[in-house]
Image (spheres, coloured by chain):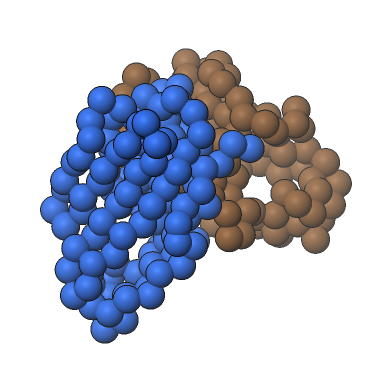
Chain colours: A blue, B brown
Amino acid sequence: SQQGEEDPQALSIQEGENATMNCSYKTSINNLQWYRQNSGRGLVHLILIRSNEREKHSGRLRVTLDTSKKSSSLLITASRAADTASYFCAEDTSYGKLTFGQGTILTVHP
Amino acid sequence: ETGVTQSPTHLIKTRGQQVTLRCSSQSGHNTVSWYQQALGQGPQFIFQYYREEENGRGNFPPRFSGLQFPNYSSELNVNALELDDSALYLCASSLYGEETQYFGPGTRLLVL
């Protein structure tokens, strides 16, 4: 497979702190997407950033994209215990056929 | 809730057996994609169906096959099961040409 890398593999923070997760990918993309997964269940789409965008916001989420470095980051501000989950980035190189990274496990302590 | 449903939720099979997993897409969606997620890994793309035809395939052997029906629901069939097929199988529906996919809760398959 051509999975990208996510960093860190695991992140443990206190409620109220910010969480930053990074993703590197390998190919030219149409867009890059971030998903959340609770306890091995289905994935929930969080945010999509297109290849011609550099930054995008949605509520407490901020995503950046650097196509020259083939990297993206997801920032969750003012984290809550309910944000505890695994977070995945996914490259979309051919619409609908996603290549996922290995994920970051985020634990937010109350 | 995304409106995408999968059945069964859990399944136990033995090596060499065959399995069929089912997915009902969100209302109005005409494209279904299947992914395999091994424990501790990210999902891997198996294939996508659009208009009842396979529309792209990942690096999976032919014993992984699928169907899409006129109502856009879909099946994933795996023949000659191997221990490494143990995983969470996720389907995702979308409207063809749109970028966001909506995932079901998955079917957890254990091969003994």
- Give residue A108's position: percent from left, percent from top: 32, 75
Q: Quadrant of the N terminus of chain A?
A: top right
Would you say residue B106 is visible in this rendering?
A: no
Residue at the spot x=31%, y=81% of the render?
A109
Q: Is B21 left or right of A63, judged from the image as shown?
A: right
Disc count in the image? 0
Asked whether, in this view, residue B15 is left or right of residue B98, the answer is right
Residue at x 59%, y 45% (from the top left corner): B36
Residue at the far left: name it.
A59
Rendered location of residue A99, percent (x, y): 50, 37
Image coordinates for residue B112, horizontal then vertical, percent: 80, 61
Q: Nearer the viewer, residue A98 or A40?
A: A98
Residues A77 and A69: in front is A69
Name the outermost residue toward the right: B16
Q: Residue furthest front?
A: A68
**Relative to B22, B19 lies left or right:** right
In the image, what residue occupies the spot 45% across and 57% down? A7
Is A90 drawn above or below residue A8 in the view shown?
above
Residue B75 is situated, as x and y percent measured from the top left of the image, at 58, 34
Image quarter in which the C terminus of chain A is found: bottom left
Quadrant of the image occupied by residue A85: bottom left
Q: Between residues B18 and A21, which one lies in front from this camera angle?
A: A21
Position of B108 compared to A80: left or right? right
Foreground of the two, A42 or B51? A42
Q: Is residue A8 visible?
A: yes
Q: Residue at 77% across / 43% down in the picture? A: B18
Please, is residue A101 above or below residue A8 in the view? above
